[in-house]
């Protein structure tokens, strides 16, 4: 019997055909793909518990317009469904901009071990982004998600400068050859206000260069992979291998 994979996307633009090709390359999964807001939340409640594997490639809970961002939490049913999945020992993989999703759901980010912020607040400044960064992804842990991969491999992708709590997870991969400092990133709040690629009036402390990890705080296996801004990363064979192994690991396929 084929294993089932639930993919949640939406809330952030991406190239649909190349992403679908990526998902199709990951193995013999029976794929259900739900997209926020039309079906990603309401339709996912039952599917979250039933799927063997779960991939978050969404940035849900936001509305952008007229230079402003509005945030909302997920429904109680959605929160309960994911909590029940994790309590049952069934894991998930979160990818790229999922680190920003559900900004008003603290437990989600406690599980993930980090959060990308579009606005400043009690947490500190808004977060930073930088597209098309060429860096070296260095494996730093022997883990089912990283096995069989070279010690390091080149990646060109978007990186984030945001709060990441390394005490909350086991680091798997670090980005080397690029400094995670304010001068190398752009302000997310400035971008929302219409000033893309701007750091004017923005400050941010130095950030972590960890870009892949396994949560220590989630009751089930939860892997975060920062890879995944677009086709250049979707087609990277080492990223594909890591994502395929992460889905297998979090669905119980690997001890």
Image (cartoon, rainbow, N blue to C red):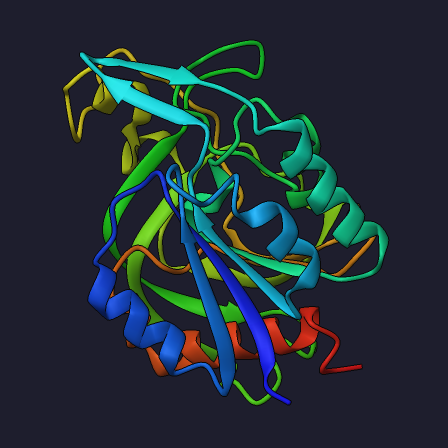
In the image, residue 98 above or below residue 171: above
Side of 217 relative to 172 (left or right): right
Name which residue lies at 44% across and 13% down: 120
Side of 238 relative to 184 (left or right): right
Q: Nearer the viewer, residue 161 or 30?
A: 30
Q: Position of residue 53 (x, y in %)?
A: 62, 68
Name which residue lies at 74% across and 61% down: 221
In the image, residue 142 above or below residue 175: below
Q: Position of residue 121 (x, y in %)?
A: 50, 10
Assign the C terminus to one quadrant of the image.
bottom right
In the image, residue 242 above or below residue 182: below
Q: Would you identify the image quadrant in which residue 89 lies?
A: bottom right
Q: How many marks?
A: 0
Name which residue lies at 33% across and 22% down: 63
Assign the N terminus to one quadrant of the image.
bottom right
Name which residue lies at 85% across and 57% down: 88
Question: Is any atom of residue 199 visible in this view?
Answer: no
In the image, residue 43 above or below residue 244: above
Q: Position of residue 79 (x, y in %)?
A: 68, 35
Question: Is any atom of residue 60 visible in this view?
Answer: yes
Q: Nearer the viewer, residue 101 or 143?
A: 101
Q: Would you identify the image quadrant in which residue 97 lies?
A: top left
Q: Nearer the viewer, residue 228 or 252?
A: 252
Q: Nearer the viewer, residue 180 or 87?
A: 87
């Amino acid at each position: 019997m084929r294993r089932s994979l639930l993919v949640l996307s939406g809330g952030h633009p991406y190239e649909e055909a190349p992403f679908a090709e990526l998902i199709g390359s990951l193995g013999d999964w029976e794929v259900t793909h739900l997209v926020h807001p039309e079906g990603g939340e309401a339709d996912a409640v039952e599917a979250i518990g039933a799927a063997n594997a779960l991939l978050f490639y969404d940035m849900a809970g936001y509305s952008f317009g007229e230079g402003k961002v509005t945030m909302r939490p997920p429904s109680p049913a959605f929160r309960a469904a994911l909590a029940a999945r994790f309590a049952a020992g069934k894991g998930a993989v979160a990818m790229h901009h999922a680190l920003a999703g559900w900004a008003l759901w603290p437990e989600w980010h406690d599980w993930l071990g980090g959060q990308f912020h579009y606005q400043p607040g009690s947490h500190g400044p808004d977060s930073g982004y930088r597209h098309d960064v060429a860096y070296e992804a260095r494996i730093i842990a022997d883990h089912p998600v990283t096995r069989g991969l070279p010690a390091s491999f080149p990646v060109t992708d978007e990186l984030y400068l945001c709060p990441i709590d390394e005490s909350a997870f086991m680091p798997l991969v670090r980005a080397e050859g690029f400094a995670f400092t304010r001068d190398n990133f752009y302000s997310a709040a400035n971008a929302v206000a219409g000033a893309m690629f701007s750091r004017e009036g923005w400050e941010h402390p130095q950030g972590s260069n960890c870009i892949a990890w396994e949560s220590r705080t989630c009751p089930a296996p939860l892997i975060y992979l920062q890879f995944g801004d677009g086709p250049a990363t979707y087609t990277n064979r080492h990223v594909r291998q890591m994502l395929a192994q992460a889905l297998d690991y979090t669905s119980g396929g690997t001890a």
